[in-house]
């Protein structure tokens, strides 16, 4: 199942704009893959003004956030992994949402790139496939057509 985080970021960002407030994003600047101006990072975090008048080309995707912003009058392209986002809030009253500290991905020692977690698989069963309790027969499978709801008590 996909993460709810990018959907929440987009929804809160839209909610802030709908209420004529200024959206800000707090980012963990040390998160792998984050491309941010390090000279503006304080205590490992960077707070970004995401108001439409302050940024260009803002794209809040499911995996990353991309935008162009000016820092000290110099335009910069920023790339932020969604997992690096710590919160989204309004400048005016601080309302919004904070997210848990991100778990840093393991890095490949040779290349420095993040490793993906692969779930451990269970060892194969010694039972023949036909004897498995999870095997469905044609009569157990749902019929094609309209979906139905079965109430179980």
Image (cartoon, rainbow, N blue to C red):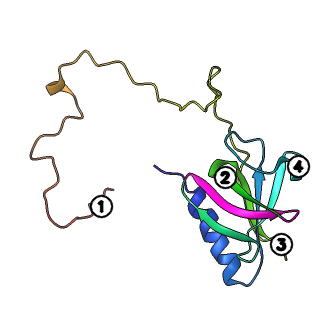
Q: Which dot, 4 or 1, sits closer to the camera?
A: 4
What element does badge 4 sit on? Answer: helix
Question: Which badge, 3 or 2, comes first in the chain's sequence?
Answer: 2
Query: Can you identify the residue that label 2 sits on?
Result: 79
**Is tag 4's residue or tag 1's residue first in the polypeptide sequence?**
4
Mark number displayed over residue 91: 3
Horizontal side of 72 relative to 53 (left or right) equals right
Given the current orientation, which residue lies at the most extreme left position? 138
Question: Of circles 1 and 2, which is in front?
Answer: 2
Vertically, is 153 above or below 73?
above
Q: Identify the mark nearer the N-term, 2 or 4.
A: 4
In the image, 123: left or right of 17? left
Q: Answer whether residue 68 is magenta in the image.
A: yes
Q: Distance between the residues labelled 1 and 3?
A: 47 Å
The tag on residue 151 is 1
State the residue at coordinates (76%, 53%): 27
Mark 3 or 4, closer to the camera: 4
Q: Residue 39 carries which label?
A: 4
Magenta range is: 63-73
Considering the image in quadrants, where does the C terminus appear?
bottom left
Q: Toward which corner of the image does residue 10 lie, by quadrant? A: bottom right
Please tell me how crowded label 1 is: few (under 14), some (14-19), or many (20+) other residues with Cα within 10 Å.
few
Q: Which badge, 3 or 4, comes first in the chain's sequence?
A: 4
Q: In this view, does 35 lie above or below 108?
A: below
Front in this rendered view, residue 61 or 104: 61
Work out how far the residue at label 3 is from the one at label 2, CA to CA, in angstroms.
22 Å
């Amino acid at each position: 199942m996909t993460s709810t985080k990018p959907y929440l970021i987009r929804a809160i960002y839209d909610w802030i704009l709908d209420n004529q407030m200024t959206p800000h994003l707090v980012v963990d600047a040390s998160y792998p893959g984050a491309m941010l101006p390090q000279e503006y990072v304080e205590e490992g975090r960077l707070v970004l003004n995401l108001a439409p008048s302050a940024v260009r080309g803002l794209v809040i995707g499911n995996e990353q956030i991309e935008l162009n912003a000016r820092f000290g009058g110099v335009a910069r392209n920023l790339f932020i992994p969604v997992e690096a986002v710590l919160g989204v809030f309004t400048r005016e009253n601080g309302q919004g949402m904070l997210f848990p500290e991100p778990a840093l991905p393991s890095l490949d020692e040779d290349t420095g790139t993040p490793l993906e977690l692969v779930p451990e698989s269970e060892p194969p069963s010694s039972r023949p496939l036909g004897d498995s309790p999870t095997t469905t027969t044609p009569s157990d499978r749902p019929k094609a057509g309209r979906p139905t709801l079965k109430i179980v008590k």
